[in-house]
Structures are given as C-alpha cells and as structure tokens.
Image (cartoon, helix red, strand yellow):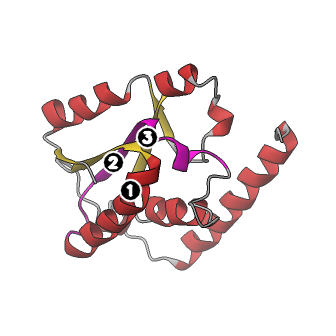
Amino acid sequence: MKRTTSDRRRQILRRMAGLTGLALVLPASAGETPKGRKSGPGVVYHVDDTATQAIAAIRNIRNHREQAPGLPIRVVTLANGIDWLLEGAQDDRGNDYAALIDGLMFDGVSFVVCRNTLDTRELSEDDVHFGVELVTSGVHEITRLQLEQGYAYVKP
C-alpha cells in the first residue's frame, strides 16, 4: 500500500513530537555534543545484507556503545543491506526495526542509505526511514570515512 504525503507528514510529526519530549527531559550543556559524542575518528559499520547483518549490527553497536559511549558510529548500507532502513521494515519475526533504529539514532549513531541502490530498486527518499541520510554511493562513503577521517571498518 502506497503512503500518501499527508500520511508521511503525520508520521514525521509524531516522531518529532516524541523526540522533542525526550529533549525536554535531558540535560544539556553549552558546547556539549549528544551523549558525550567525540569528534574525530570513529567506526563505520558496513551492512550489505539485512537478513544476515542487521540484527548483528544492532548488537555490535550496542556493545560498542557500552565500551565507548562517545565514539562516532556511522552505519552505511547498500544493496540488500538497506532493507531494514526502509519504512515499515520488519525482522523475520514481524518486529519493526523502527524503534531500534530510532533508539540508536537518539544515542548518536548515524545511518546512511546508498542512493544508487534506491535508484536501482526504483525506490524514493520517502521509502527510507525518517532521519536516515542518503549518499550517492555507499561504497564511496565507506572509503571516504576510512581514508579521509580515519574511521575503523566493521562488517557484522
């Protein structure tokens, strides 16, 4: 079933309202990054197969966060790895990925979808989970993070 623009807007407004409520109860200091996040080198997670890597990536990221709470983490998805970042995506048990993704985003993890994959599969930006970034090429983004910003590479 295709979502209408007004359905999409309502969904975005509900999510924004929820995030706004959370922001009101969290302390903030001037110049402080979210969750003590540090700038500089971080970790890039490469996901190219949702079925075998999405849940493993979520577990790995949570473990990573426990050991290094401020470490920048960027999840770059391409090919079949974008599926869990699409609106309405569910795991093989029928559980929505949305709450897991939103929780990690709130914790400072950024998610990226390859636009080349979207184009190949004839999907649009509207098909992607709210808050997920788009890059022209997922492979290029992974390489850029490693070579230009010193990110470590992890493939769950």
Identity of the residue drawn at 25% across and 67% down = 64
Relative height, residue 119 to residue 1 (above, below): above
- For the magenta stretch, what is the residue range? 68-87
Check if mark 2's residue and mark 1's residue have beta carbons within 8 Å: yes
- Would you name the residue on which mark 1 appears? 109
Residue 85 lies, in percent from the top left, at: 54, 47
Check if mark 1's residue and mark 3's residue have beta carbons within 8 Å: no
In which quadrant of the rendered image does the N terminus lie? Answer: top right
Residue 87 lies, in percent from the top left, at: 65, 47
At label 1, the amino acid type is Val
At label 2, the amino acid type is Arg
Query: Between disc 2 and disc 1, whose residue precedes?
Result: 2
- Camera-side residue of 51 and 67: 51
User: Disc 1 on helix, strand or loop?
Assistant: loop
User: Disc 2 on helix, strand or loop?
Assistant: strand
Work out how far the residue at label 1 is from the one at label 3, CA to CA, in angstroms.
Answer: 10 Å
